[in-house]
Amino acid sequence: MEFTDEKLAVLRQLKAIKEANTKELLIKLGPKFKERSVRRWLSEMVQEGVIERIGNRRASRYRAIQTPEAGEFNRCFSPRSLPAIALIRRPIYERAPVAYQDEWFDAYQPNSTYYIPEGIRSQLYLAGKRFQDHEPEGTYAHRIFDRLLIDLSYNSSRLEGNTYSLLDTQKLLLEGKDIEGKMDEEKVMILNHKEAIRYLVDQAHQIHLSPQTFCTLHYLLADGLILAEHAGKIRNHGVRIGGSTYIPYEDPARLKEILHQIASKASLIHDPYEQSFFLLVHLSYLQPFTDVNKRTARLSANIPLIKQNLVPLSFNDIDREDYTSAILAIYELQDVQPLIDVYAFSYLRTCVQYDSTMKAFGFDELRVRYRSQRRAILREIILSKPHKEKLDEYAHVQAAEKIPSKDLKAFLEDVKEDLKLIDESRIAGLGITAAELLEWKTT
């Protein structure tokens, strides 16, 4: 469905005068609008379900059913998205049931087909690139980890109806403070996001796009929220989408097959934003799990961005209804334009916000660059328990094998600082228990 500026002008004018025939519209539109074009646009919009025709052909009058303008929805939607938004915001009984469209998925050819236009992909890359190509995978995500953790947990949960505020989310994630009166399920949803995001960032150097990765993310996001037997497992039963006429596949063998195809096609895509968007679209569309599908798709869409040290996608500043509408346009119309608008709008705003955050807090590049090596040495020290008088020597020997000489002194200072400050809240990712830490401290 094409929605040009001229066609949008006809729609806006029809809304302004409530109801009109072609002649009345032409008078209001002015001499720049040709009758033949206006009649064609009116006919198209009747077919698209945006307006309705009243009366017989000779005396036809037109009336807007839902006349969408960008200002009536979130600022993210472009004119080209408005017909699809109008269609899927009609009452559900006016929308026809639709099954999974294999032809649509099969038609996508990596690096030949593109959902996101080249101009938008270039704009996203210029806004989102932060490091040179030689930096280790996940470096930027480590740099902004707390901000990413809060924003992505909050926004992804909010899009599912979670009522935690941004401040409540921060207190829960960083301080462990529960919010009185909040449902346990909402707390678990946010804490599960924390585990899944930590997995993405800590494992960035070895994560691959595979069904196993998608299932792992689903397990981390769904643990405690659905039956244990379904967490991380492809469903073996049918599901229905609330508020939608879309009917996903029910056959588990077919779901498994398509999930493998999604991973295979995504792995071939060169452009990180197209790869990210493809995952967001098709993991949402397939609905491979009992529940928590859209959350899994949102975090999976961050894999290419995190691995290539681009600003992650936190889904900031998106209205929940707009996001739902964009996803429904995928389900029922296979129209990606509304979701492209949502994706680009949120991403560009997030880039600006993260730049402001980094300017305020600064960045210790060496701590990020050698994070895994530092954690490995901390673990060895705590488990091996070298005599405290020989601790510096032990750390130096361990580090000299892993760290370039020019960075060794600063690295050892970071190790010493971490040993001084370490407690139960700082052992995540070290592979040690609280009891092992206590034993080291008391030795």
Image (cartoon, rainbow, N blue to C red):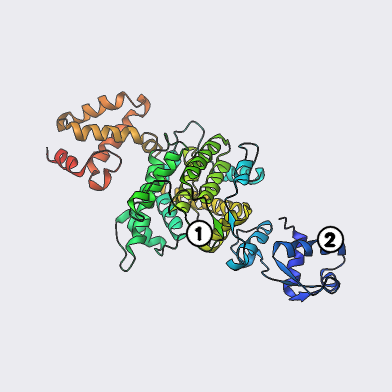
Front-most of 406 and 106? 106
* Type of amino acid at the residue the image marks with label 2: Ser
Residue 420 position, x and y percent, is 22, 41
Front-most of 354 and 412? 354
* Type of amino acid at the residue the image marks with label 1: Ile
Front-most of 91 and 421? 91
How many other residues sit within 10 Å of disc 2, few (<14), some (14-19) or many (≥20)? few
Q: Is residue 223 left or right of residue 93?
A: left
Foreground mark, 1 or 2, reads: 1
Q: Would residue 47 be visible to someone looking at this image?
A: yes
Q: Answer above or below: position of 403 versus 75.
A: above
How many other residues sit within 10 Å of disc 1, few (<14), some (14-19) or many (≥20)? few
Which tag, 1 or 2, sits closer to the chain's start? Answer: 2
Residue 244 position, x and y percent, is 55, 61
Q: Is label 2 in a helix, a strand or a loop?
A: helix
Q: Is residue 242 left or right of residue 118?
A: left
Marks 1/2: CA–CA distance: 39 Å
Q: How many marks?
A: 2
Front-most of 20 and 164? 20
Q: Quadrant of the N terminus?
A: bottom right
The residue pinned by badge 1 equals 241
Q: Is label 1 in a helix, a strand or a loop?
A: loop
Residue 219 position, x and y percent, is 37, 47
Q: Is residue 316 left or right of residue 336?
A: left
Q: Are marks 1 and 2 in contact (CB under 8 Å)?
A: no
Please report the residue visible at 31 percent of the width from the left and 34 percent of the height from the top.
374
Q: Which mark is residue 308?
A: none
The residue pinned by badge 2 equals 37
